[in-house]
Image: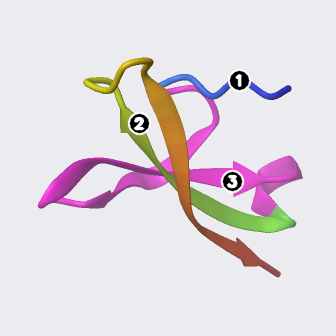
Amino acid sequence: MVSVSETAGMIPGSTASASRPQQRRLALGEEGALGIAEYVIVLDADPPHILMTHVLLY
């Protein structure tokens, strides 16, 4: 199981959209060598969860 916090591991420019500040980008692999994952933190859901929206592999 992998845990993603609101700030850990985020890359520069990690907020994917000014209109959707809850969307984040996370570098995959060391220095992002494997790609980038985009996810949304859904804090107001019951239970709170993370939704992967896009994975770009290099």
Figure check: 58 above or below 35: below
Circle on res. 27:
3
Q: Residue furthest front?
A: 46
Decide: marks 2, 1 in contact (CB < 8 A)? no
Task: Please state which of the two labelled residues, at mark 1 or mark 3, is closer to the viewer.
Answer: 1
How far apart, in angstroms, are the residues tagged by discs 2 and 1? 12 Å
Circle on res. 41:
2
Figure check: 45 above or below 25: above
Figure check: 31 above or below 58: above
Alpha-carbon neighbours of circle 1 within 10 Å: few (<14), some, or many (≥20)?
few
Does the magenta-highlighted stretch encompass residue 13?
yes
What residue is at 86 percent from the left and 66 percent from the top? 34
Q: Residue furthest bottom?
A: 58
Decide: marks 1, 3 in contact (CB < 8 A)? no
How far apart, in angstroms, are the residues tagged by discs 3 and 2? 16 Å
Examine the image and state in which quarter residue 44 appears: top left
Q: Which residue is mark 1?
A: 3
Q: Earlier in the sequence, mark 1 or mark 3?
A: 1
Stretch in magenta: 7-32
Q: Nearer the viewer, residue 55 or 45?
A: 45
